[in-house]
Image (cartoon, grey):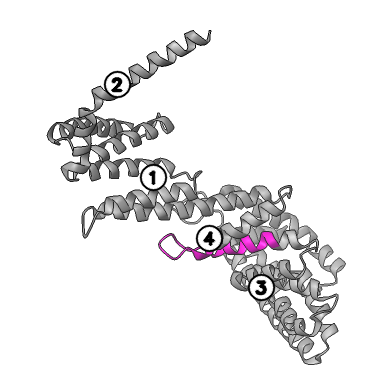
Amino acid sequence: MQKYKKSHKVAQRSGIFITNNHHKTSKTPQKETEVTNILHNSQKNINFACCISGLSTLKPLIMQLQMMNLDTIYKYIRCISLAFAGMYVITSCGEYQAIVKTGDNDYMYRSALKYYEAGDFNHASSLFEIVMPSFTGTSKYDTILVCYAKSLAEIGDYYSAANYFQNYVKTFPSSDSCEVCQFMAGYCYYMLSPKIQLDQSDSQSAIDELSTFINMYPYSSRVPLAEKMLKRMQDKLAYKDYINAKLYFDLGDYMGNNYNSAVITAQNCLKKYPDTRHREELSFLILRARFIQAERSVLQKQSQRYRETIDEYYSFVNEFPDSQFLKKANSILKDSEKGLADAEKLLPPSEDDMEYYKNFGTRELEKQKEAEQTIKELRNAS
């Protein structure tokens, strides 16, 4: 108890319980209380624990730790952990080199499996890569290929992993591991999907592989996760198409009719990804582009393009009756109807229209005569 009291006083002076005159209590009293209890209880059991474990040389170290504050103890723990990690790396590297130097393919194969099961995928992948050519065409090639692909995925080499997963599915189409490999191929491309500003070839590959997995294994337990990843990739590509369509829209009449390009790009996106969460934005972009295109068209094309804008408005409102763009859409409808009326007033009738109105009365008279003749025939037949 005297030693404990001395250590307690030293701890108080060192700042565990009272840091200085300005701070009468510790910032973490709960932790300090726990440390105090641990120190008090451990003092009674140091001799017993050291005797039981046979590590009597640790007794001075434990006594020294009792005199330190928490920060110092944590530093010691971190240093010890790093030291053990370094010793493990050195030992494992030496062991790996010894395995490779044997040149025994069977031994390297068994060692690769041990590394794989232990979670050391770096050494496992290296050994699998060495022995793979020697076991091609044997019964072990199946296991080597799938373990090698999984090891590559675990260490983040997704390009190579996706290639080997696809190779496995083609080489062993009836294997039980095909389901996992097909899923992992899509997962690897999903992980390779870059930022939206970059080329999205890997995103498209992820969509292809995940779609194949869902179609081939519709009852798999991995289907919900595959569908979630597939939806994210599709939304990503749809958003990229939306950005491209918006770019055409912002270019306007610069070096051509970019509004028509915006409409075509947005429509193609909706055809490819009908369930995208950006569907509302794409549909409203089409409506805006059609209206501005009609507004800036020559008089001869305004009537037709205003009608297309009005049709697009009703399609948009029917699909999104509570849209955030509803107020702007109603304004576009009002302006389109006014523009259509003005265009029809100013536009002179074409030759086809003149011919139509000229022969309108004659055609109506002929239709009336045909109807009367049909009625007479029905009466005679009855």
Q: Horizontal and vertical percent for residue 108?
A: 80, 83
Q: Mark 2 near mark 1, Cβ–Cβ under 8 Å?
A: no
Q: Horizontal and vertical percent for residue 377?
A: 46, 13
Name the residue type under label 4. Gln
Task: Determine crowd level at label 4: few under 14, some 14-19, many 20+ residues with C-alpha closer than 10 A.
Answer: many
Q: Horizontal and vertical percent for residue 307?
A: 28, 35
Extent of the magenta region: 182-202
**Mark earlier in primary sequence (4, 1):** 4
Q: In what quadrant of the picture does the N terminus appear?
A: bottom right
- 372 drawn magenta: no
* Distance Cα–Cα, label 2 vs label 3: 102 Å
Residue closest to the eye, 98 or 197? 197
Could you say whether the residue bearing mark 4 is in a helix, strand or loop? helix
Could you say whether the residue bearing mark 2 is in a helix, strand or loop? helix
Q: Mark 4 near mark 2, Cβ–Cβ under 8 Å?
A: no
Q: Which residue is mark 4?
A: 204
**Mark earlier in primary sequence (4, 2):** 4
Residue 325 visible in rendering: no
Q: Horizontal and vertical percent for residue 83?
A: 66, 77
Q: Which residue is mark 3?
A: 80
* Distance Cα–Cα, label 4 vs label 1: 20 Å
Q: Which residue is mark 1?
A: 282
User: Is residue 13 placed above or below 339 in the rendered structure?
Assistant: below
Q: Nearer the viewer, mark 1 or mark 3?
A: 1
* Distance Cα–Cα, label 2 vs label 1: 45 Å
Task: Determine crowd level at label 3: few under 14, some 14-19, many 20+ residues with C-alpha closer than 10 A.
Answer: few
**Mark earlier in primary sequence (1, 3):** 3
